[in-house]
Structure formats: C-alpha cells, structure tokens
Amino acid sequence: MKGKITISRLSYGDDRERIEITIRDDASRVNFVTADLSYEDFTKALTGMNETPCNLKIDCLRFVGKSKETKSFEFEIPGCDYDIGRDKTEEIGLSKCPKNWVMNKYFNSKNSFFEKDGKQYARTSIYRYV
C-alpha cells in the first residue's frame, strides 16, 4: 500500500508545543491516522526511542485501500440561480444524488449554477469509494 506522511508543528498562539503526524492513503486519499505528541516526545522518537507515547486519532478505515471515484454532478433546480437558496439547492441535489454516491455540498463557485435548454441547473461533484 502506498501513502503519504505529513509532520506538522501546530501553533495555538499560546505555550502549547505539539507535533502532529498524519498518514494518508494514496488510493482513497483519506487521512486515516493522526498522531499528536509533544516536542519532547517527538524528539525522543526521532532519536530512536521505541514506543514513544502519543495520542492517536483513527478515522475512515473503511475507505483505506479503496479508490476514490469522483465525477461532476448536474441537476435541474426550479427558478433562478440563487433565488432558491443554498439549503434548498442542497436538498434537491441530495434527493437526486445516485445511490452509493456522496454529494459535495459546495455551491459557491461561479460555475455552480448555469442555464441549459432554458432551465436552471446546479453543478457540484459526487464521489464514492470502490
């Protein structure tokens, strides 16, 4: 399995000194492990200390190793572009979203709304893991 690792020095604007290590699966493009540790413990780990303590957050394991498939999703909406509002556009989109796909709820792009054949449409993306 291929992946990526990111090491970040977190800044909270106070005296907390923390390091965050994130592991990302290349296939699904999800971050599935995040480790949080102090500068002191990070230094110990870098210099070879085994089993250095940290706080772990595990997420999205059901997607690890799967491929993320994404495609454009267009659907008809009543009325004019922004007249129906973002919440109503989202509601309509969710009702028309194909089964087993997840709809991106972002509708703030200049290309999110358009006219085709005299009707108003919304455009976003949908994705699934296969």
Image (spheres, helix red, strand yellow):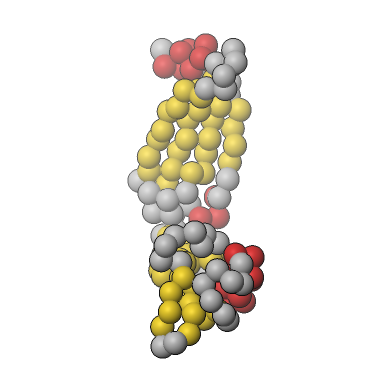
Number of numbered tags placed on the structure image: 0
In the image, taking residue 111 as reference, residue 50 lies left or right, namely right
Across and down, in percent, residue 35 comes to 54, 30
Identify which residue is drawn at 41% across, 66% down.
111
> Which corner quadrant holds the C terminus?
bottom left
Across and down, in percent, residue 23 comes to 45, 38
Residue 87 drawn above or below residue 33:
below
In the image, taking residue 59 as reference, residue 27 lies left or right, namely left
Instruction: Tell which of 130 and 81 is nearer to you.
Output: 81
**Occupied quadrant, residue 91:** bottom right
Instruction: Tell which of 126 and 39 is nearer to you.
Output: 126
Q: Is residue 98 visible?
A: no
Residue 77 drawn above or below residue 48:
below
Residue at the far left: name it. 2
Identify which residue is drawn at 48% across, 77% down.
121
Identify which residue is drawn at 40% across, 35% down.
5
Identify which residue is drawn at 59% across, 32% down.
56
Q: Is residue 15 visible?
A: yes
Across and down, in percent, residue 78 comes to 58, 81
In the image, taking residue 29 as reference, residue 33 lies left or right, namely right
